[in-house]
Image (spheres, helix red, strand yellow):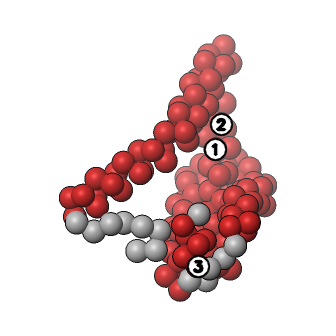
Amino acid sequence: EPMFESLGVPLSLSGLWLGAYSIGGLAVLPLWVQLSRRSVYRAFLLYIACLLAGTTTMSAGIRLRSLPLIMAGRGIAGAEVGIRYTNEYLLYMIVPRSDRSYWMGLWYTLTAVSNTTGPAVASALTNAASAVGGHAITAMT
């Protein structure tokens, strides 16, 4: 929200922020399926490429104060969601059928815990870094 306010964009457009990530993930999912079946190594390379390209594009958008560039970066970053398919594919290949439900449950539990605690941990680390470094880290720095 502070990012939208600092750009002078109505807060009602914040829904696009979430939607761009989801659309990017859905649009690239067929590519993830094909790539994971051919080479898991290449799927991880695609994950790294999406992560770097999306983050770089969003950072450039924030630096240049360009909402379209920020949204494009968010969509590119959303494409990395396909790595979850690759992880499931690996579990299906490696884990025997009788143990699969345990490992899938563990995988989704860890994913849920990391998704819910991630923002709090990031906030705590940002506050600690600003206290140690003496510089307040915000969305626009």
Q: Nearer the viewer, mark 1 or mark 3?
A: 3
- How far apart are the two marked residues, 3 and 2, measured between alpha carbons? 39 Å
Say which residue label 2 marks.
Answer: 88
The amino acid pointed to by label 3 is: Leu
- Left or right of residue 94, residue 34 in this image: right
- Could you say where residue 47 lies in the image, as x and y percent from the top left? 57, 57
The amino acid pointed to by label 2 is: Glu
**Dot placed on the residue nearer the N-terminal end, 1 or 3:** 3
Instruction: For the residues labelled 2 and 1, say whether their Cβ atoms are less than 8 Å apart.
Output: yes
Give the structural element (helix, strand or loop) at label 3. helix
Q: Residue at x 41, y 51 (%)?
A: 123
Q: Is residue 118 above or below residue 79?
A: above
Say which residue label 3 marks.
Answer: 7
The amino acid pointed to by label 1 is: Arg
On residue 72, which mark appears? none
Q: Is residue 82 above or below residue 140?
A: above
**Dot placed on the residue nearer the N-terminal end, 3 or 2:** 3
Q: Nearer the viewer, mark 3 or mark 2?
A: 3
- How far apart are the two marked residues, 2 and 1, measured between alpha carbons? 6 Å
